[in-house]
Image: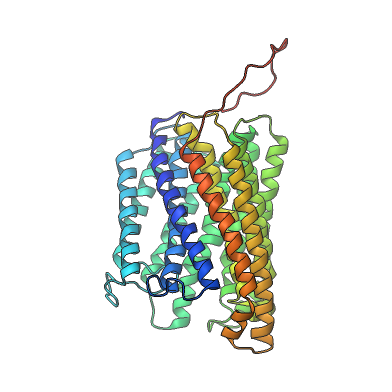
Amino acid sequence: MKYQTQKIALIYFAVALALFAVQVTMGLILGWIYVSPNFLSEILPFNIGRMLHTNSLVVWLLVGFFGAAYYLIPEEAEREIHSPLLAYLQLGILVLGTAGVVVTYLFNLFDGNFLLGNEGREFIEQPRWVKAGIVIAALIFLYNVSLTVLKGRKTAISNILLLGLWLLALLFLFAFYNPANLALDKQYWWFIVHLWVEATWELVMASILAFLMLKLTGVDREVVEKWLYVIAALALFSGILGTGHHYYWIGMPSYWQWIGSIFSTLEIAPFFAMMAFAFVMVWKGRRDHPNKAALLWSLGCAVTAFFGAGVWGFLHTLHGVNYYTHGTQITAAHGHLAFYGAYVMLNLAMFTYAMPVLRGRDPYNQVLNMAAFWLMTAGMAFMTFTLTFAGTIQTHMQRVEGVDFMSVQDQLWIFYVMRFGSGVAVVLGAYILIYALAFPRREVVKPGPVQSHKSAETPAE
């Protein structure tokens, strides 16, 4: 650790991991409800559990991004964070808002109240007072990190990261606009939901991945930055008009069917570029970094994001296919693998790299961490395949043969059982990973034979 204010990141990572545990646990409960629909129906209705699952996912990913920024920006800007106090105030606001959301959802408080009640719009159900708090926290963050970068060294990594985070915050302002017309509501709603995860978050992903590759492989910064600019350009070019694939069936003009189809097929390009980038950097690398687990998560992130967000997204993005598959378990398969590969694994790669450094435990024993990687990734892959098969059967029975929804669900029970089993593997892997990061054991380095020549390896950072 080169800068004292990088320690700010540690508490952000801790909060993110706590919310990660909540998110996967709630996901496992929801998976069992698919198998046994009356489970907890009086205590925790499915719609409330789903809100907690999806909201905690978004919040912990954002908190992880903020923590990653507080860790990497001092190194990129070569100066301390402008105000640690503001960073902790920002986190306090986010934690208070999260607690308020959980209580509001669980106990259905202030139902129908304009300011205090659940707004009821998927993913942005938060009460308006919480949304206002999120905006305040985002403004504090942007002021803090932007001032740090402006006063220090400017790099492609920090510039692309700030661009992604500024756009992310600005797009969230559409959450305050809730028009009465449903088609118009959905148009602006997708400005948040799609342009976050398939445009601005991709910029954040690319910049953090570039930072990790720079540290883990020792490749020249110039090479990393050239790749980063190409990936950022591809993400924005394909992601903005690619939003049109969500406009097919919400009352928008028919030309969106072609715009959405064409640009959505291009959305696979930035994820392929990120996968190629990660492997080329490792191939060109001059450094044998001791943190093998961080490198494993980084490469796994690039590969899984390509398949989850790229390939599985492409499977049903064309309007002729989407007409049948929209809203089926195929959508769930794509969503789970895409979020896990692109953003969950990205955060876990950053945590795996930075937390041992921040806690003074580097190098550390990484066996548990890497075991968690394979357990979670295998579980998520199996979940994706079971949901894909379930969605294919659902599409044919429900959308082609016209069988009613509940009868189709009865036919899919075996897939839901298998999905629950894979969820158990994912949750177990998540708990193991959290334990490995929370209690890292220092690596016992055994003295090797005396070398008669000097090592040519570049020292690891």
Q: Where residue 297 appears, x then y in whole percent?
A: 60, 45
Number of dots carrying numbers: 0
Relative to residue 344, is residue 334 depicted above or below? below
Snapshot quadrant of residue 60: bottom left
Q: Where residue 427 appears, x then y in whole percent?
A: 53, 55
Snapshot quadrant of residue 42: bottom left
Query: Residue sitting at 33 percent across and 53 percent down?
Result: 95
Q: Where residue 124 appears, x then y in whole percent?
A: 41, 68
Q: What quarter of the picture does the C terminus occupy? A: top right
Snapshot quadrant of residue 219: top right
Q: Is residue 160 visible?
A: no
Relative to residue 46, is residue 253 depicted above or below? below
Q: Where residue 362 appears, x then y in whole percent?
A: 52, 29
Q: How is the image coloured?
A: rainbow
Query: Residue sitting at 61 percent across and 65 percent down?
Result: 419
Foreground residue among 367 and 1? 367
Foreground residue among 95 and 321? 95
Relative to residue 334, is residue 443 depicted above or below? above
Q: Is residue 75 visible?
A: yes
Query: Residue sitting at 60 percent across and 68 percent down?
Result: 417
